[in-house]
Image (cartoon, helix red, strand yellow):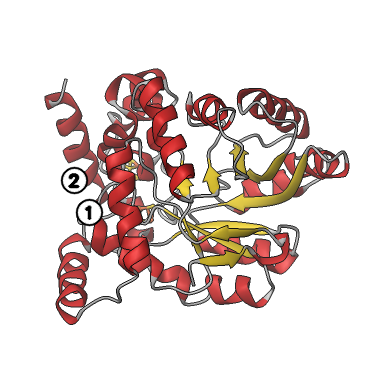
Amino acid sequence: MKRMVLGRTGLEVCRLGLGGIPLQRVSEAQAVETVRHAVEQGVDFIDTSRAYSTSERRIGLALAQTDKRVVVASKAQAKTAEKAWADLHTSLAELQRDYIDIYKCHFVADEAIYQKVISSGGAYEAYQRAKNEKLIGHIGITSHNLDVLDRALDDDLFDVIMVCFSFLEPKAREEIIPKALEKNVGVIAMKPFSGGVIEEATLALKFALSEPGILVIPGVGRSDLFDQNWKVFLDAEPLTDSESARIAELRNSFDKVFCRRCDYCQPCSEDISIQTILGIRSSVKRMGRSQLEESFLWKAVEKARNCSRCGDCMTRCPYGLPIPDLIEESLAWLDEDE
Ligand code: SF4
Ligand code: SF4
């Protein structure tokens, strides 16, 4: 139960991996120490991305200091083959490796992007070439949109999918996770704390780990936080009745405020990335405000100030979120936090 084979990749790993987002938020020394500590304890799967600023480099520095075998996965948001090839080579250099076990098409938000990625001249082509040249072992895809992952499973082009899975976002276990496991596609469950929205980490992790056959990768930047997760993993206690009741209570309280990042509300006439803005508080928590201000996310914040409150997005949100109000609250929070 503590180890698993990640689908058709054949890679055997510990069911609790390490997510690389928060490693960019702490000092370099602390990030390196956290990765080394996790690997010493027994973690042998680490996930990162070109999009996580210093994360790849810090993981590379840490892994250069250990002889332990660690499966490394990274990803890039490139859509074209040319950009994907360049990004992959940057990842290889930053991670100090000549081979990356799994490289994924990152944040494939919708069907149009998916088609671009898999078509001739798209990113997938570059990763196939990289696989043939033994620069990577397997190709994966990440998306917050379950329809995209469903399509990817039908097309059968990917060895691994990465999907949001938490007690606030449990939908993947209805169809996507069983379908992937049936096709022997590896499943990496990201965001077990829903991107920092769930503060009761033990509860969140117990829930995610209770789903069989999936690899769970909570992101942490500090060793003490890693230890808390590791203890939950080692204890492997099932959810108690009172914990299940608490989960139901939290689900209820977040129901009309938590954005599931599915993008069904798009397109917005003002070109606002709604899910980015509704998740901006957790992005600040995970990345730190200064990194956020330097990233592409800040442009999304500026665009969000143009929300006309037309309400079109609300007619498309399957969760009935009061989107213009939530945008206003997020912007007010950011302005107050300055
Ligand atoms: S209410 Fe705001 S976010 Fe929603 S579609 Fe209109 S402009 Fe876009
Ligand atoms: S606002 Fe609603 S439709 Fe838009 S991404 Fe969030 S949950 Fe999905």
Ligand 1 within 8 Å of the CB at mark 2: no
Q: Position of residue 154 (x, y in %)?
A: 70, 69
**Residues under labels 2 and 1: Cα distance?**
6 Å
Which amino acid, by three-letter code, is at mark 2? Asp
SS at circle 1: loop
Q: Quadrant of residue 253?
A: bottom left
Ligand 2 is located in which of the four quadrants? Answer: bottom left
Image disc number at residue 229 = none
Question: Which part of the image, by quadrant, shows the C terminus?
Answer: top left
Which amino acid, by three-letter code, is at mark 1? Pro
Q: Position of residue 71 (x, y in %)?
A: 62, 47
The residue lying at 30 percent from left, 30 percent from top is 306
Ligand 2 within 8 Å of the CB at mark 1: no
Q: Name the residue furthest left.
A: 336
Front residue of this view, candidates 77 and 63: 63
Q: Which residue is mark 2?
A: 325
**Drawn side of residue 223 relative to residue 183, left or right:** left
Q: Which residue is mark 1?
A: 322
How many numbered discs? 2
Q: Position of residue 131 (x, y in %)?
A: 82, 44
